Amino acid sequence: MYKVKIIVLIIMFSFIKTTVNANYEKLAYDFYFKDLDGSKMSLSEYKGKVIVVVNVASKCGFTNQYEDMQKIWEKYQSKGIIILGIPSNDFGSQEPGTNSEIKNFCEAKFGISFPMTEKVSVKGDNAHPFYQWALKNYGKSSVPKWNFHKILIGRDGKIADTFSSITNPSSKKFISAIEKLI
């Protein structure tokens, strides 16, 4: 019975969001990625918008979330929402393709039209500077634990919330969070 209580406590504490009280010396707008074609994509282009940053993978059990991400993009784009897909091979080698292969997969299978970056690392010492900034300013809940982790950036360029992979973009919880920001 004691072991069960310990396991339950561990599970409960794993869902608690820990944030850092940050001074935000930088904002999300201070970072850039390259898109799947290799062109520079500065987040400053999205200043004043709500940005949903999602690390994605083509061979993941959550890959079908692309469909709901596209629907959110289509519904809320005119209201100031940007969906930004960040391909990463950090979890289970589930994004092994080249940038060109990723682009073809996303367009052909899901009709993705929202911006996608080149494949980057999203965790650890080699994480893209955006993800290092997120950890410093928002804490461990901003670090993806798996593919399709979501970071919401408010219109002020600061992290407003984070959602784990199991939170579907079409869920009431997620929709409510983005609607509060727009």
Image (tube, rainbow, N blue to C red):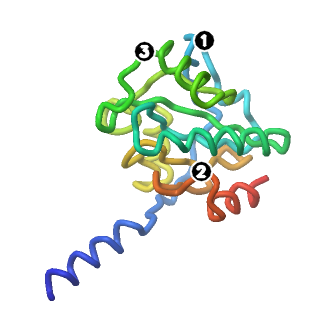
Please state, as top left, top right, bottom left or bottom right, where the N terminus lies in the image: bottom left
Q: Along the line of sight, which residue is nearer the eye, 148 or 178?
A: 148
Marks 1 and 2 close (CB-CB < 8 Å) = no
* Residue type beneath disc 1: Ser
Label 3 to label 2: alpha-carbon separation = 29 Å
Marks 3 and 2 close (CB-CB < 8 Å) = no
Asked if 65 appears above or below 180 in the picture, the reply is above
> Horizontal placement of 102 versus 73: left or right?
left
Label 1 to label 3: alpha-carbon separation = 15 Å
Question: Percent from the top left, x then y, of residue 12?
Answer: 35, 74
Binning the other alpha carbons within 10 Å of mark 3 as few (below 14), some (14 to 19) or many (20 upward) gives few
Label 1 to label 2: alpha-carbon separation = 25 Å
Q: Which residue is farthest right?
A: 78
**Residue located beneath label 1 in the image:** 39
Question: Percent from the top left, x then y, of residue 140?
Answer: 40, 54
In which quadrant of the rendered view does residue 32 lie? Answer: top right
Q: Along the line of sight, which residue is nearer the eye, 13 or 169?
A: 169
* Residue type beneath disc 2: Ile
Asked if 111 appears above or below 49 in the picture, the reply is above
> Horizontal placement of 80 versus 87: left or right?
right
| Mark with earlier residue (1, 3) | 1
Mark closer to the observer (1, 3): 3
| Label number found at residue 98 | 3
Q: Secondary structure at mark 2?
A: strand
**Residue located beneath label 2 in the image:** 159
